[in-house]
Image (spheres, rainbow, N blue to C red):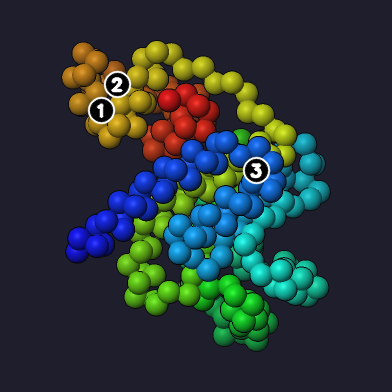
Amino acid sequence: MIATRAHSMNLDRNFINLIEEAQSVRNNSEVHELLARLTAVYELSTVAYVAVNRPGTMGRNRYVSATYNENWINRYNEQNYWQLDPVLKQGFSSILPVDWGKFEVTKSPLRRFFGEAVEFGVGRHGLSFPVRGRYGEKGLLSISSNMRLGQWIRLMPSWVRDFPVLAYHIHQMVLRAEGHREPKIKLSPRELECLKWSAAGKSAAEIGIILSLSEKTVRFYQDLARRKLDAKNLTHAVAKLYSHDLL
């Protein structure tokens, strides 16, 4: 139990460190280095990030950075597997994490596709996390593992907790590496205070006591900040505070 708790605490620290590192990345070689570190920290088999419709590209090209075996990348391209790959098909059409274990792989093409992927080092279990950008771009962060199924299932809640946030920061990291700059967002002092205390784990009621505001007023400022940050929820808004260097 103590070892499990210590492992969880280490992952939490590494989670914050990875977000901070992503904010400092400025070129594509550093993007790949961070994905490799992410693979090692979470003890995964592979990590891959794919984006389409990036700002300024007119939707004509894809961005790919992955820790895949180079032979698998060559095989994937030679066989035009992007036309078959259900990870891409479902990932780019979904807003929720995609569990590879839900794919129907009894048909020959998909059975061969996933069988070859495993042969080339891709894990037997996988999850993909979609990102939707404000400029119409789409990103997809995919992770895979060969750990025992029981361990994968036990860890899945932590994957689903951490990786949507990591996917967002990796998406922003790639945009910066490609030369795109986000417009400066300005929050009022009250909006910033309310989000900062949210980032510290305080509830709206607790923040109200700290700032001498009603709980309703705190929620009002949080909602204003969330809209300015173009965030889906409060957790997303807090994550964006880090990416915009507002904390």
Residue 204: mark: 1
Position of 6 with respect to 192 (left or right) is left
Disc 1 from disc 2: Cα separation: 6 Å
Residue 176 figure quarter: top right
Q: Specify few, some or many for label 1: CA neighbours under 10 Å numbering under 14, 14-19, or 20 or more.
A: many
Residue 222 figure quarter: top left
Measured from the top left, where is residue 151 in percent x and y?
A: 35, 72
Q: Which residue is mark 2?
A: 218
Name the amino acid type tagged 1.
Ala
Secondary structure state at the residue bearing disc 2 = helix
Position of 159 with respect to 120 (left or right) is left
Q: Identify the residue at image location x=40%, y=20%.
A: 192
Measured from the top left, where is residue 2 in percent x and y?
A: 20, 60
Secondary structure state at the residue bearing disc 3 = helix
Tell me whether circle 2 and circle 3 mark residues in contact (CB < 8 Å): no
Which label's residue is closer to the chain start, 1 or 2?
A: 1
Name the amino acid type tagged 3.
Val
The answer, for residue 10, to whether it is visible in the render is yes
Q: Identify the residue at image location x=36%, y=15%.
A: 190
The answer, for residue 84, to whether it is visible in the render is no
Residue 67: mark: none
Q: Which residue is mark 3?
A: 174
Comparing 97 with 7, the one in front is 7
